[in-house]
Image: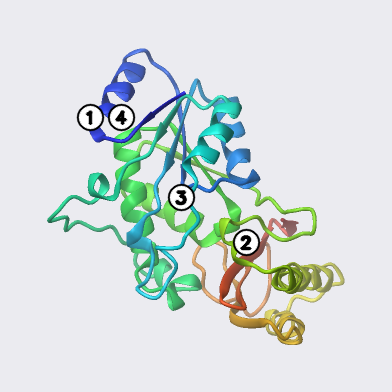
Amino acid sequence: MEIVGTVIELREKIQVWKKQGQKIGFVPTMGYLHEGHLSLVRESKKRSNLTVVSIFVNPMQFGPAEDYKVYPRDLERDRALLEREGVDLVFYPPVEVMYPEGYKTYVEVEDLQDKLCGKSRPGHFRGVCTVVLKLFNLVQPDEAYFGWKDAQQVIILQKMVEDLNLPVKIVALPLVRDHDGLALSSRNTYLSPEERRAALVLKKSLDLAEKLIIEGEREARKIRQKMIELISAEPLARIDYVEIVDLKTLEPLETIGDQALIALAVFIGRTRLIDNLRIISGGIEK
């Protein structure tokens, strides 16, 4: 496995692989890898000839008061994990490579970027789309792998790829949970043991929504209210949002039909966590 940090080095490798007709799979990450990331890597290894992973903590997707400076970083740990998985190439650029002095170009997916997480994190998805498009242009993957844990991100990137006619397929895989049910996230490392226990209320609220749907409830307002009541009973929890929306437009739903996304963001102490479940063709996808 090789690690490169410049555009020239990366392009040299990609050009050779393209000339050979290799199918390239790509997993963009911000590092501090966990089993969720590695599940994407394994899928790429199954479906592609060569797998590229990027590690870049993207300052453009963090707000001024967010955790960019303290976001967990450990390249040696990540290197060992990726080498064990058989990754072919890691792109690990410094900020000045991705955003050189005088950088002024940004990518936005209007409307979708302003809902859910975009409401409380203005500019976040502009940063995500900008860096992902740059990485797609550099890596030129046939397929790129993302997890449904960041459901809004997946939906926005799918729309970006569609609208800009990008020659890459977005492959979205189920979110991965820890043994206690908490969705895996690099930010879980911020949680104290007490906060970790409190954070399980996210999954409990989704389990409640699933139970209500299985029992026949389809009125979104009632399900949402029950979820809010459950989360609000946890003293360490502060709700950012709990929403039931259309899986494509992210518009709020009155009645749950064949397609829906139940998404939530909750602060546990000072740590903001997200989770969701999807309803596809009337069935629940976790």
Q: Can you identify the residue that label 4 sits on?
A: 10
Outermost residue on the right side: it is 215
Real-space Cα distance between discs 1 and 3?
A: 21 Å
Pick the front one: 173 or 124? 124
> Label 3 is placed on what type of residue?
Met
Q: Position of residue 256 (x, y in %)?
A: 68, 72
Q: Is residue 260 visible?
A: no
> Mark 1 near mark 4, Cβ–Cβ under 8 Å?
yes
Real-space Cα distance between discs 1 and 2?
A: 35 Å
Q: Which residue is located at x 33 percent, y 24 percent?
A: 14
Q: Which callout, 4 or 2, points to the residue nearer the camera?
A: 2
274 w.r.t. 30: above or below:
below
| Label ID, residue 188 | 2
Q: Which residue is located at x 40 percent, y 63 percent?
A: 69
Which of marks 2 and 4 precedes in the sequence?
Answer: 4
Which of marks 2 and 3 precedes in the sequence?
Answer: 3
